Amino acid sequence: MFYGVDVGGSKIAFAVFDEQGHECERRVHPTPQASYGAFMALLTEWVNAADIRWQTTGSIGIGFPGVLDDNGLMLAPNVPAIHGRDLKGDLQQQLKRPVYADNDANCFLLSEYRQGAADGAELALALTLGTGVGGALLHKGQLVNSRRGGSAEFGHGGINATLLERHRGLPLFPCGCGLRGCLETYVSGTGLARLYRHAGGAALSGPAIIDAWQRGEQEATDALSCYLDILAAGLGALMTQLDPDVVVLGGGLGEYAWLYRELAHRVPEYLMTGVTPVPMRPPVFGGSGGVRGAALLARCAALPFS
Ligand SMILES: [Zn+2]
């Protein structure tokens, strides 16, 4: 059996998968916010209960919003309870078994590569459009990871300069990464809210802005038009530079069917001459991609890709 853990800023999910990849059990809990001890206790309790229930010693994979540093410490500023901690090492010691951990966007793409939207792709790219923007690249069945696991940070490239000409007065928003004008600051859920306020709208969530756009509200129409243009330019640059076989969009915004129709119209304008648009697909596993991908980290370590 393989156990997948998907760590988010507000909730944490745990699921048990059998050797064939079927999900047997799932648990969800609010993420312990400050206490590392409480975080460890929750995971240990889940794992021990699953071991007893399924009469096994399951391998563990963890997807989290961040990277591992040179010493194996988790850098995850949005999850203070594990930020700067050796969660992988401590769990291995406490639970006496291998524990694997990777960035959550990597887990998302790994899941879509196995019988999902990126199945069979030689080079697959994922962009997750949630609270932040995650990126992942998978080549011939292997996640492309740098020595420090910090590769594919597509959300932290600057936006296309021609957008500043087209959308006069578009601010260069400061990003949590220390740079300004990063793609993430415009095309994440919080980025959409920022664009809406810039267009004269109130402080609304991403889904509420999309509802207003569908009702034809002017501020929401302006914000979405700008949002789609910036996202199309970002995807166009990635397609020109990397030429993947498929692009899968995850996160809350990646679930909207209209997003793919809009992008299909807008992306070609941002491609280098001669570059063919790459198919953009919604995820097959949707919200379960995180835990499934995390469990696959453990499964792939045990059984090589077939
Ligand atoms: Zn950034």
Image (tube, helix red, strand yellow):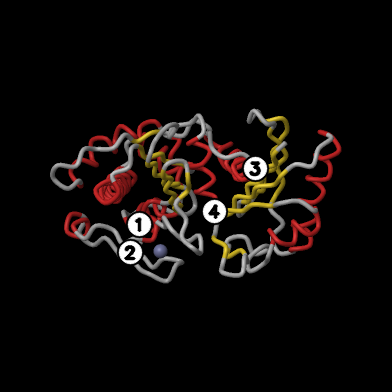
The image quadrant of residue 4 is top right
Disc 1 element: loop
Residue at 72% over, 57% down? 32
Task: Name the residue that disc number 3 marks.
Answer: 302
Front of the two marks 3 and 2: 3
Under circle 4, the secondary element is: strand
Q: Point out which mark residue 146 bears.
A: none
Q: Is mark 1 within 8 Å of ligand 1?
A: yes
Label 2: which secondary element: loop
Percent of width and height locating residue 179: 38, 69
- Which residue is identified by label 4? 103
**Quadrant showing the N terminus:** top right
10 Å crowding of disc 4: few (<14), some (14-19), many (20+): many
What label sits on residue 183 in the rendered view?
1
Callout 3: SS: helix
Report the mark closest to the observer, 3 or 4. 3
Task: For the residues labelled 1 and 2, say whether their Cβ atoms are less than 8 Å apart.
Answer: no
Mark 4 near ligand 1 (CB under 8 Å)? no
Residue 293 image-quadrant placement: top right
